[in-house]
Image (cartoon, rainbow, N blue to C red):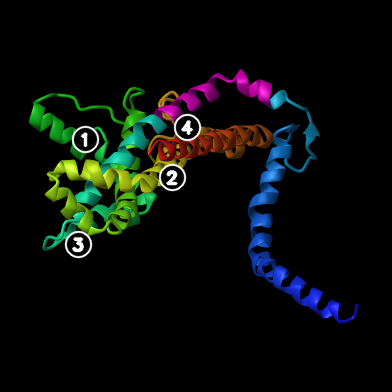
Amino acid sequence: MQKNLPKNWALMQRRLTPYLFLLPALLILGLTVFLPAMQAFYLSFTRYEYDITQAPQWIGLANFRRLFGDRVFWQTLQNTILYLIGVVPVLVIAPLAIAILVNQKLRGMHWFRAAFYTPVIISMVVAGIAWRWLYAENGLLNQLIKNVFAVKEGIPWLTSPQFALFSVMAVTIWKGLGYYMVIYLAGLQSIPADLYEAAAIDGSDGISKHWDITVPLMRPYLVLVAVISAISATKVFEEIYIMTQGGPRNSSKTIVYYLYEQAFQNLEISYACTIGLVLFLVILGLSILNLKLSAGRDRIS
């Protein structure tokens, strides 16, 4: 019995060692992510607003009933879905085309890579202010439109409900092209050149070789970019805050900005937690949908 004890203790040490290495990270995640998430889930069933020194009062599903009847919430949800539909397809397809272009072995191509990646390293605050100047009534874009098309008035990019959301989308796309281009470049450079040479012998060359070889082999990267860009588009905030403040008439207000507005401007903490819970479910659903679709494509192939 005593001889078996050291063996059991050594086996237990080997099993516990990985968890001991994970313990510091788990403690940090627990204090900064999991515990606040559980508190937010609890607060979504309470009334906790205006005076945060008071203890939360349990009100059950009242916040959810208010949410389902909130016209502004449904408008922000519609704007978020529209943002998702407008941004994600472009950020999945355009960076792949750019990555194929800059992956060519031509002299000076690294300068083009740097040019496409430069918007990624620019702060969103700086980018938002710069684009707001470009979109101004007397900004560069409207001056070009007036001079080229000989019109008297420019386009109200950020002050019209018809254009505001799409104008902000353009900034998100501009910032994201270089980031996703780098992800695709990593995938493209892992494809053996022999495959393209064999495809050229079989008559697949030019654009057709990318359709026959590049796109099928890049499928995991396409799924990754689709998931990341979808989650990022759903959580968009900085562009809205800097450029439009959700206006005009809530036309560019998204779920995350509405959550911020309720929590930090109206101090309705519990209602903001309810909105956050719905946002979490939306992001979770998008992630599961993307994974299911990618798994289905793998089975078909």
The disc labelled 3 sits on which kind of residue? His
The circle drawn on residue 228 is 2
Look at the image and say whether residue 66 sits in the magenta stretch.
yes
Look at the image and say whether residue 81 sits in the magenta stretch.
yes
State the CA–CA distance, disc 3 to disc 2. 25 Å
- Check disc 2: other Cα within 10 Å, few if <14, some if 14-19, many if 20+: some
Q: Earlier in the sequence, mark 3 or mark 2?
A: 3
Residue located beneath label 4 in the image: 254
* Quadrant that contains the C terminus: top left
State the CA–CA distance, disc 2 to disc 1. 36 Å
Q: Which of marks 2 and 1 is nearer the N terminus?
A: 1
The residue closer to the viewer here, 208 or 255, is 208
Q: Where is residue 187 in the image (x, y as percent from the top left)?
A: 32, 54
- Check disc 4: other Cα within 10 Å, few if <14, some if 14-19, many if 20+: many
What residue appears at the point 46 percent right and 24 percent down from the top-left corner? 78
Q: Which of marks 4 and 2 is nearer the N terminus?
A: 2
